Image (tube, grey):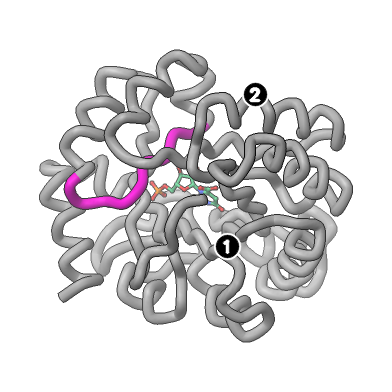
Amino acid sequence: MIQRPNRAGIIAALDTQSPEQAEAWAEALAPHVGCLKLGLEFFVANGPAAVARIAPHRPLFLDLKFHDIPNTVAGAVRSACALAPAMLTIHAGGGPAMVQAARRAAEEFGPDRPAILAVTVLTSTDAATLSATGVSGGPAQQVLRLARLALEAGADGLVCSPREVSLLRDAHGTGPLLVVPGIRPAGSAAGDQSRIATPEETADAGADWLVIGRPITAAPDPAAAAAAIAASLHP
Ligand SMILES: O=C(O)c1cc(=O)[nH]c(=O)n1[C@@H]1O[C@H](COP(=O)(O)O)[C@@H](O)[C@H]1O
């Protein structure tokens, strides 16, 4: 299983349809980040074979956010494990049996299996959006509820926003891997993200990994942007 960084490490989100672009980013960013994330945009466009082009550069986070019946998720996890990612995502909202099925399927791949990360409440979701889905009590309460469910069912870690990191550390200690998107260096555009904070704030709160996409990939010089964020975390 992937090593936990000393202070928050950077995961660069390579959100693109283009395998050439993803590979160019992977090459340029590898010296500055600990992990590379491929998500639905890349995977749906290019399929599993293209994942192999990115894998040599850095450990891979395969972010396909599985959410289905337990048997289907177990099968999807097996298929994903064949690509040897370091981490993969499922939705905690799929419930305990689904999370358990994902963990068991991953365990078939032995000690080098990927970490199973349960996505709690998406970082783009604000209180009003959450309430529109029928969930009362606000994002923090729902993150805590889903985190407990997922960890009890065998998730190795959680995906949450910067706003819930210290709450989760208080509730669950240092055990779970906390992987945190919604990272915005001061002055960068929030875009569709709602629950955000800076890299330094998120690292100070106790995140293990910071997932950063557009603040790096949309910068005029992505490698320089990643280097600057890394320097701000490890001055
Ligand atoms: O699972 C994720 O990685 C994820 C969960 C979440 O709640 N919010 C979230 O933004 N992400 C991913 O993190 C990345 C954030 O990208 P930027 O908003 O461009 O920094 C995207 O690839 C999202 O798919």
| Eye-nearest disc, 1 or 2 | 2
Residue at x 46% of width, y 77% of height = 206
| Mark earlier in primary sequence (1, 2) | 2
Q: Which residue is drawn at 38% across and 73% down?
A: 203
Q: Where is residue 144 in the image (x, y as percent from the top left)?
A: 72, 72
Asked whether disc 1 touches disc 2, contact meaning CB atoms under 8 Å apart, the reply is: no
Which residue of the protein is positioned furthest toward the bottom in this rendering? 170
Three-letter code, disc 2: Ser
Location of residue 162 in the rendering, given as x and y in whole percent from the top left corner: 48, 69
Q: Quadrant of the C terminus?
A: bottom left
Q: Tell me which corner region of the image, top left, top right, bottom left or bottom right, holds residue 182.
A: bottom left
Vertical position of residue 175 compared to residue 32: above or below: below
- Cβ(mark 1) to ligand 1 < 8 Å? yes
How packed mark 1 is, by other alpha carbons closer than 10 Å (few <14, some 14-19, many 20 or more), is many
Is 38 contained in the magenta span?
Answer: yes
Which residue is located at x 46 percent, y 56 percent? 181
- What residue is at 21 percent from the left and 62 percent from the top? 230
User: In this rendering, would 225 be left or right of 52?
Assistant: left
- Would residue 233 appear left or right of 227 to someone viewing this image? right
Look at the numbered disc 2 and give the secondary structure of its residue.
helix
Identity of the residue furthest to the front in this view: 110
Residue, disc 2: 79
**179 displayed left or right of 70:** left
Q: Which residues, given as a range, are shown in magenta?
A: 31-39
The circle drawn on residue 160 is 1
Residue 16 point in image, percent of width and height: 37, 27
Cα–Cα gap, marks 1 and 2: 25 Å
Q: What residue type is labelled 1?
A: Cys
Instruction: Residue 165: give x, y in percent of width and height.
Output: 54, 74
Q: In this view, does 115 lie to the left or right of 69?
A: left
Considering the numbered disc 1 on the image, is that residue within a helix, a strand or a loop?
loop
